[in-house]
Amino acid sequence: MEKNKKNIKLKRVLFISEILNPPYDEGIKKTVYNLFLDLDKVFDLQVICRYGFEKDNIHIVNTNPLFYSKEVKIIIKEFKPEAVIYLPFQSSTFASYLRLKVFSFFARKSNMIFIALQPKPVKEWQKIIIKFIKPKSAFTPSPELHEYWNSIKVRSQLIPLLTDLSTFRPLPSQENKKSLRLKYNLPPEGLIITHMGHLNEGRNLKTLIPLQKPGIQVVVVGSSSTPVEAQGKRTLKDELLNSGIIIIDRYIENIEEIYQLSDLYIFPVVKKNSSIGMPLSVLEARACGTPVLTSNYGSLDYYLGDDYGGIFYSEPRNFLKKLETIKTELNKDLNKTKVSELNDIFFSSIHKQINK
């Protein structure tokens, strides 16, 4: 594709998000980066962000919170994008709608596309304003946000998220699993259950404590991107550690290895604002062939169902009881997954909207 880009007139696409720099260790950052990689291959792309890495088509701007600045205006006016995609790092906050309005003011003739990964609380007076500055076209993996947009007559679409299938894939053998466990100083035998994500109160992590018992090791891998104000009380971490749960709160470069060494990935989140609308960690676990025990969160069931027997749903308070009933299922070959199909849906949906 790179060779052909010089000879084909490609659509000019401007991609805007706050953060594009590594480490890519949580769902929103991964989605932004994976979308950037795709757009950069397929379109004539320019990027505006606050934090990013050096590349000719990436503009790192130092501007006010709403991106209303001469610098941003000049970049947009000179590039003349045919489509503008805004994926806010803070998702669908009131400020995100205001920023989108600023971008649409600077790029009046562009096809404006809003992508928000989870709903955010907005006040009643803000909802009134949002009705007047609402996006013309929007995508989300969150059923709740999709429903809200429909209620205010936004042309919106529910979409899944992207998974890097070149990185997240099954191990060739069980021996590799034991080697990985030793690499991370984890028990080579017994059942290992893992969870990835921010170490905060909203993730419902205390429901993992009953699972920590003889023959079972629970491992929680935190994100280095967790804001200090979102980390919750120190007592949460202490309570998990005191129960015997292992916490890895450092950046792991080859995070796929944690999924690969696991017998089960677990997702206990129930609060709609505590994770993106389609938890990327669940998709990554399934791409690695690891079975998943999860709450019925966001659009997981809508897009994956039981994923060929690889996903089990339960209320988190019943996780231990559910685990007892599915233990024999965990020994089966569960490598078959719908995750690659979801990648195709994501790409085709975004590309179709850009090319309108």
Image (tube, helix red, strand yellow):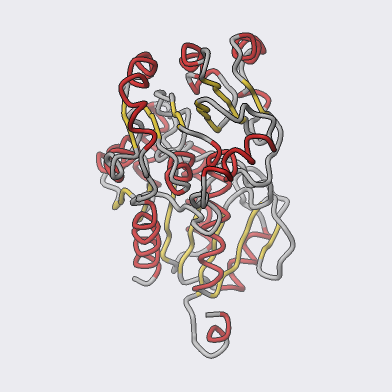
Residue at the location (62% across, 30% down)?
222
In the image, 301 versus 333, the foreground residue is 333
Residue at the location (36% across, 54% down)?
342
In the image, 28 versus 207, the foreground residue is 207
In the image, 172 versus 289, the foreground residue is 172
Residue 152 x %, y %: 28, 41
Residue at the location (70% across, 70% down)?
56
Residue at the location (26% across, 43% down)?
150
**Rendered image quadrant of residue 106:** bottom right
Residue 144 x %, y %: 32, 35
In the image, 257 versus 25, the foreground residue is 257
**Rendered image quadrant of residue 137:** bottom left
Is residue 221 in view from this perspective? yes
Picture layout, residue 326 above or below residue 67: above
Residue 265 x %, y %: 46, 33
Q: Quadrant of the C terminus?
A: bottom left
**Relative horizontal placement of residue 316, taking residue 98 as reference (left or right):** left
Picture layout, residue 53 above or below residue 76: above
Picture layout, residue 51 above or below residue 45: above
Is residue 136 in view from this perspective? no
